[in-house]
Amino acid sequence: MTGWTGKMLRVDLTAGETSVEELCRHDLRDFVGARGLGSRLLYVAGAYAVDPLAPENPLIFATGPLTGTYAPSGGRYNVLCRSPLTGAIAASNSGGYWGPELKFAGFDLIYVTGKAASPVYLWVNDGRAEIRPADGIWGKTVSETEDAVRAQTHPEAKVACIGPAGERLVRIACVVNDKSRAAGRSGVGAVMGSKNLKAIAVRGTRPVRVADKEGFKAARKRAMEKILSHPVTSGGLPTYGTAVLVNVINAHGAFPTRNFQTGVFAEAERISGETLAKEYLVRKKACFACSMACGRPTLIPSGPFKGSGEGPEYEAAWALGADCGVSDLAAVTAANWQCNEMGIDPISYGATLACAMELYQRGYLTREQAGREMRWGDGQLLVEGVRLTALREGIGNLLAEGSYRLASEFGHPELSMTAKKQEYPAYEPRAVQGIGLNYATSNRGGCHVRGYTISSEVLGIPEKLDPLVPDNKAFWVKAFQDATALVDSSGVCLFVTFAIGAPEIADLLAAATGEAYTTESGLLAGERIWNLERMFNLKAGFTRADDTLAPRLLSEPMPEGPARGQVSRLEVMLPEYYRLRGWDEEGRPTEETLARLGLKW
Amino acid sequence: MARKMLVVHPEKCTACRLCELACTFHQDGEFHPLTARLTVGIFPEEHVFVPIVCEQCEVAACQEACPSGAIWRNAVTGALEVDTSRCVGCRMCVMACPFGTMVHAEAGGKMQKCDLCQGDPQCVVACPWGALEYVEPNDAALARRREVARRLAEVLKGVTV
Amino acid sequence: MVAVPAVQVQLFATLREVTGTSRLALEASSVREVLSLLASQYGEELRRRLFTPAGQLQETVAVLVNGRNIRFLQGPDTPLRAGDTVTLIPPVAGG
């Protein structure tokens, strides 16, 4: 096969066995790879019915057909399972070098089930695999784990692992590869921990091939010309990284502050991309095969948070900054490094801490219960809290459950800023209408990268849509969601879509795989994947009632700024969205829709 | 006119490894970092990334070590190339090369190395940041001296004699 | 005589590098006036980033008045009142 390797590594940790299986060509073609293919396998396995932290929950590490090639930013992989945070489908996307290495080792994906009797790591070396004891490694931080596993395997091995958070089944734990790239969301790290699987080391020395070399070269050239000439992908992202959005989103009054109590953070400048570039940025860094280099190696030369690492990205700068009212960039940066080391999703961590701070502000969480003060803007608490959460110590044991369970524990679930129990990212649905519909309908719960309408509603790419108006947003949310499902499944980074779209992705897929992908069939595959994820969630028990937002966003008018007086108009957008999707009034795909997409219950 | 050479600017490298991919796709028609004729050394803790390329040495250890006389110099590009009809795959060149840029082909068991893509190095084309350049050595050296001078000038601006 | 409104101008990202400032005060009664004052004050480099060769505002540059994109107001003719904030955003993105 070309593009795909056509092989999957099956690992049964209970039995301590590994085997190599062929993947079905029809599945590959129809679900493309990575997120789509992994979702297909989860659905077929009936993972919607398992306890997320039970041995039966499959944990899938999946690449796409463009992973490992020089397709623009073609270095992505997804980690999939049923989420212990949401109970919905989880598909978390990561860059770095690990995904391509898996392709070079001869596999499209690794499918892990069961639970090892004691901690282990998996060593995948060129088509072979071995389950090894992780006795001396369990308990270590991410960078320590990576170094230790590499020392025991091969100096060139790439490592994906969990930190102490995943080991302790923290529901917001992530899987980290290459020390600072993370499959961040939905608690996939806790599922890895529940299997007693500390790390997967991969070494691959094989080639990745494409079906049509000249065609691939030409398709890549066309795509790169757009990426290298677009001011965002060739200028904005490499120069300032994603954190350049801090000031931009704040200027729009869409920068959620103090647990979404407002959309304006007066001190945004202090945690902005511009300030980061001036104060702590060392240089720019890319993931595999990426020309955009948005990675931010950072260094704090002195003071209480002295050190070095990577990030924060925009989302982390927001969650650890504005959402917790913290304006000390050194504290935000150090907390981000701690999240990398402990293996915690900085979005959900920051948002959960913010929720705790609001509970404290309103007197629902007392100093006695928290064991300390929980004041807005406390940078020391922000940094220390990461470790407490990872180790489930003190207040950390409650933060480890995510904001929904935390807020429910104290009787105020309405203060959890979540959809399907997953924390929202860094855009206010009252100030940007379409993104609210996307949060409410995202198959993995609160999330911006399922349908990044910010691109059109704020940045004007490709369309220029008024953020305050709900009209026609259902159409755009669907369009973004379907295209994104295709992009995520192909193995390239979503950020290329600031410059290219489905036509370029389809050309690359066709030349790589030899399958006749077109713009239409590619987008149809995206829609198929979206609907399959939806079916997973419906079978997991989700209903229309779960396609909603926190009451605050629906009923409390934005108190200040450009979106003052606005609420989310979800009630207008959602029915239109269902109709455009070909779903019934309960949000279930109709038989006609399923037939059109080639899906069956 | 002196022959051009590959010049590396590690400070511009972002560790994306597109050079490795473009190299093997051009040379072998597949994406295969292991057999790329150049490699990016990545040191994440220090935030340092250094592409290592074949220097096409004037006095070349690979050529001297080759017992079958398989390594010859292309008079047009100046690149040292492997004559696969003479290469016996003994890998003496691997041991001799101080930069580690000799590559053992998995198919056929012969040696491979950077041939500067016959004068149009694809690694240079692929690099988004100009971390690899294909220039005449004296131009490269001159540019480097100018760069050092510029930095010195910055320092001197603040000095009153 | 009507006084020309005093407004605040906010600049982000590369526009800061070109102008060497992140914030300044101007007197202008429309967005168009703000843009031309800036272009004359900071020269060709800024003019090139804000305007097409034909003198139109660049598609990729976002201009906000009090946080609202002028696309959804009256474009460059959007009038200004004393105390308004005009924000200029070069092409950037993130996620």
Image: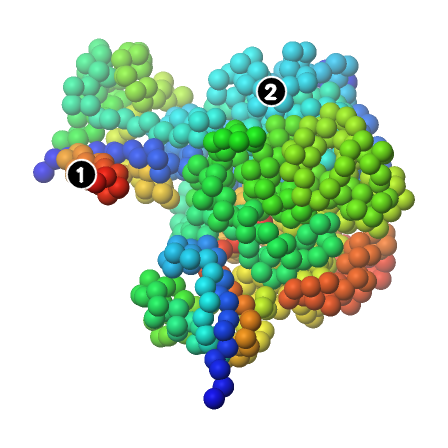
Please say whether residue A493 is visible from this viewpoint.
Answer: yes
A537 or A339: nearer the viewer: A339
Which of the labelled discs sits on residue B161, or is there none?
1
Q: Is residue C8 left or right of residue A267?
A: left
* Disc 2 element: helix
Q: Quadrant of the image for the N terminus of chain A? A: top right
| Relative vertical location of residue A503 with respect to residue B72 in this rendering, above or below | below
Determine the residue positioned at 50% across, 77% down: C5
- On screen, residue A221 versus residue A357, left or right, reads left
- Determine whether A255 is above or below A132 in the image: below
Could you tell me which residue is drawn at 40 percent across and 26 percent down?
B41
Give, as a three-letter code, the residue at label 1: Val
Q: Are marks 2 and 1 on the same chain?
A: no
Q: Nearer the viewer, mark 2 or mark 1?
A: 1
Q: Residue furthest left?
A: B1
Residue A70 visible at all: no
